[in-house]
Amino acid sequence: MNINFTLIAQAIAFAVLIWFTVKFVWPPLLKAIETRQKEIADGLAAAQEGKSALEVAAKKSEATLNEAKQKASEIIGQAEKRATQIVEEAKGNAKAEGDRIITGAKAEIDQEVNRAKEGLRAQVSALAIAGAEKILRKEIDGKAHSEMLSKLAAEL
Amino acid sequence: MATEHAEHALTPSQYISHHLSFNAQSVGNGSFWTLHIDTLIMSVILGFLVMGFVWWVARGATAGIPTKRQAFIELVFGFVDDQVKNIFHGNRHSFIAPTALTVFLWVFAMNAMDFLPVDIFAKLMHAIGLDTWRAVPTSDINTTFALALSVWILMIFFSIKVKGFGGWIHELFYSPFGTKIWVLPLNFLFNLIEYVSKPLSHSLRLFGNMYAGEVIFLLLGMWAATGLSGTIFGSILGAGWSIFHILIVALQAFIFMMLTVVYLAMAHESH
């Protein structure tokens, strides 16, 4: 328990150590730690930001998807309508064409019938005249009676 | 000291007093002008080893992913910084926190010299021609008193720096009991006792713990020299005491640091 000069020597050593720590040891450690703390804080903030941005993007993509779906169904609806329209149009055209063909055929048939009638009429009048000639022979004036028979044939 | 004898030829009291004597060198006239070479060299080497190691790590400290070494130093740094932050509410980074780190690590390293096996260490030092060599600087009252007194001077320095010389004198007389004229001497007496007791308790607590620890190691070592059963029990108890001493070494370093911080923080507060 003897106090001596060692006390002063130790105090000087202590002072030097404190000076050394204050000057060279503490600041770089503090700087490193504070910089890292700041970096971590920034990183966390950035992560939070990214998360919210992701949420916004997800919402946006969902909205876009919905819009696209709606548009697609609209387009499909329009296409269906158009298809029906085209089919209807085609049906109408076909019917008109058929009608036209039928009308033409009918007209031709009528013509044919008329022509046949004409022929028959001529033949009938000729046959009638020939029959009458055979029956009447000489007493009948061919010219006067054929006129009368032509009139008769026209009345048929 | 009876160092010429072989160890086993010593009487117990000679053995203990041999182990507890300093390597004292006279540097002038009178008993004050002696220097404990062992205390001084051990403490300076330890101080610069420990703080040098921390400095070496701090110099290469990165703000990115720390190495394990850096992480360890940052752990100690954070521990000390947290303690200081709780007690002192000023700019701790400019002086008080680094001082606390110095005190903690240095005192811890000096205390830890108690773990060296006393006799093997003494034999080693004897082999290089040093008959008396005490390994634990903190079991020298000069070391602990030097630290406590330095803190005491810092305490007064900060008191005057923060409150001004007048403010400091004012505080000596007007606190803690009030400003009535008849309590002023009482205030002064109270503050005087506080100023005397602070460095005494600060230094003697550490010194007492480390000195007692050393003496117990010596007693156990002495017991171990008495025979087979003494060796067995002395070893077992020595191991037990070493393990318990780990706690004391860390705890005393921590307490010394905390008191340093508390005293310096108190000096910053006005009453």
Image (spheres, helix red, strand yellow):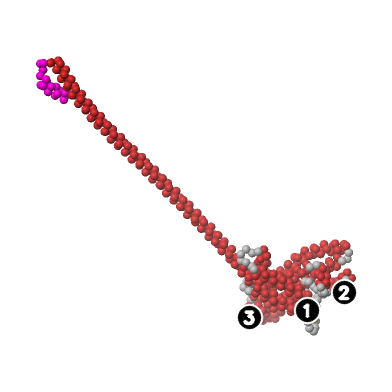
Q: Position of residue B205 (x, y in %)?
A: 75, 72
Q: Which residue is at 14% across, 22% downward? A: A149
Per the rendered image, the range of residues in magenta is A138-156
Q: Which residue is mark 3?
A: B164
Please give the chain letter of the residue carrying mark 2. B
In the picture of the structure, the residue carrying the numbered disc 1 is B35
For marks 1 and 2 on the same chain, the one whose residue lies earlier in the sequence:
2
- Quadrant placement of the C terminus of chain B: bottom right
- Left or right: residue A47 versus residue B236 is left
Find the distance from the CA under tag 2 to the CA under tag 3.
59 Å
Is disc 1 in contact with disc 3, using a CB cutoff of under 8 Å?
no
Q: Which residue is mark 2?
A: B4
Mark 2 is surrounded, within 10 Å at the Cα level, by few (under 14), some (14 to 19) or many (20 or more) other residues, namely: few
Q: Is residue A153 inside the magenta stretch? A: yes
Sequence-first tag of 2 and 3:
2
Task: Please state which of the two labelled residues, at mark 1 or mark 3, is closer to the viewer.
Answer: 1
> Residue sitting at 44 percent across and 51 percent down?
A67
Q: CA distance from mark 1 to mark 2?
A: 23 Å
Residue B239, relative to residue A136: is it above or below? below
Percent coordinates x, y for residue A66 in the rendering? 45, 50
Q: Nearer the viewer, mark 2 or mark 3?
A: 2
Which amino acid, by three-letter code, is at mark 3?
A: Gly
Residue at mark 1: chain: B
